[in-house]
Amino acid sequence: MHGAGEYDTRTRRQDDILRMAEIHGKHRTSAILPTVYPGTIETMRENMAAVRRAMDVQREGARILGVHVEGPFLNPERAASMDGKSFLEPSVETLSQLIEDFEDFIKIMTIAPELPGALRVIEHCRTKGILVHMGHSDASFEQAEEGKRAGATGITHVFNAMRGFHHREPGLAGFGSWMRTSMWRSLRTWPTCTPEDYRLFAKESDGANEGRHCRTSRKRTLAQAVYR
C-alpha cells in the first residue's frame, strides 16, 4: 500500500507513515508493508528512511513490517499512474546504491523482468534476502518464466500495468495463473481487478475460496497474505 487518507510514502516525515499505520489499524488491518514509489535514488532512500524510523518508534496502529520497493526498474510502457520518466535501467550497481543499509528492511522489490539487465538484478536481490515480484511489465510468458528462474516469486497487482492476457501470448498474467502453485498467494494480495477475474484464475486452486472473500475479510494480516 502506498498510503492512507491524505498521507503516503512520498515523504521524509516518519509521522506521515505513523498516521498511515494508525488509519489502517482503525480499519482492522493488523499489519502493512508500505510501498515506496519509483524516483531518484536519493528520493527513494529518503522515503525508505522515513518508513524505517516510523517502524522503530511505532507503538500503535497496523504493524509496519518493512517496505515494498515498487521500482525503479520498471517498464515505461507499463507505467500506468506512475511517472515513467522516473524509471531507471536495471543494473546491479544502481541496485546496490539504492538498497545499501536497507537490505534487511526491504521485504519485496517489484521489477520488470524483460528489461535488459533485470535478471541479474533479480538474482542479486535474492542473494540479499529480498523477495522479487514482477510488475509494471510488458513481459511475455517466456520472459516471465525467465524472471521466475532468476528468482522472482510473485506478481504485483496482476492484470494492472502489464500486458493483457491473450490466447496466443498469455504474458505475465497468464504465467502467474499457470504457476499458481508458487505465485498465486501474491497474485491475490493486491485487489486491483474484479472478483470474477480472481475466481477465473483461482479455479482448481486451493486459494479459490479465499480469493473470493479477500476484499471483505473483517481482519487481514498482510504478512500472512504475502508470505504464508
Image: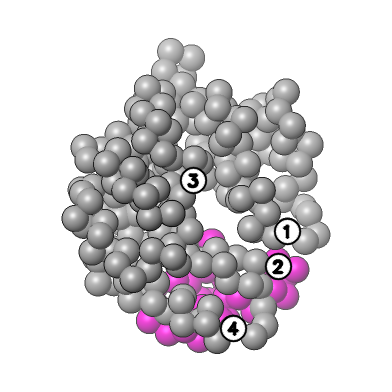
Q: Are marks 4 and 3 in contact (CB under 8 Å)?
A: no
Asked if residue 64 lies left or right of residue 86, the reply is: right
SS at mark 3?
A: loop
Picture coordinates of residue 15, whole percent (x, y): 50, 86
Distance (Cα) linking label 4 and label 1: 19 Å
Q: CA distance from mark 4 to mark 3?
A: 27 Å
Checking the image for residue 156, the label placed there is 3
Amino acid at circle 1? Arg
- First in sequence: mark 2 vs mark 4: 2
Circle 2 — which element? strand
- Give whichever of discs 2 and 3 has the lower sequence position: 2
Please report contact status of discs 4 and 1: CB closer than 8 Å, yes or no: no
Residue 14 part of the magenta-drawn span = yes
Residue at the spot of label 4? 58
Q: Between residues 117 and 80, which one lies in front from this camera angle?
A: 117
Mark 2, residue position: 30
What is the number of the mark on residue 220? 1
- Element marked by disc 4: loop
> Relative to residue 62, is residue 110 drawn left or right?
left
Q: In what element is the residue under mark 1? A: strand
Which residue is drawn at the image coordinates 80% and 59% (left, top)? 218
Does label 1 or label 3 sit earlier along the sequence? 3
Residue 5 drawn above or below residue 146 = below
Marks 2 and 4 sit apart, C-alpha to C-alpha, by 13 Å
Q: Which residues are magenta?
A: 1-30
Instruction: Give the crowd class for mark 4: few <14, some 14-19, many >=20 residues within 10 Å.
Output: some
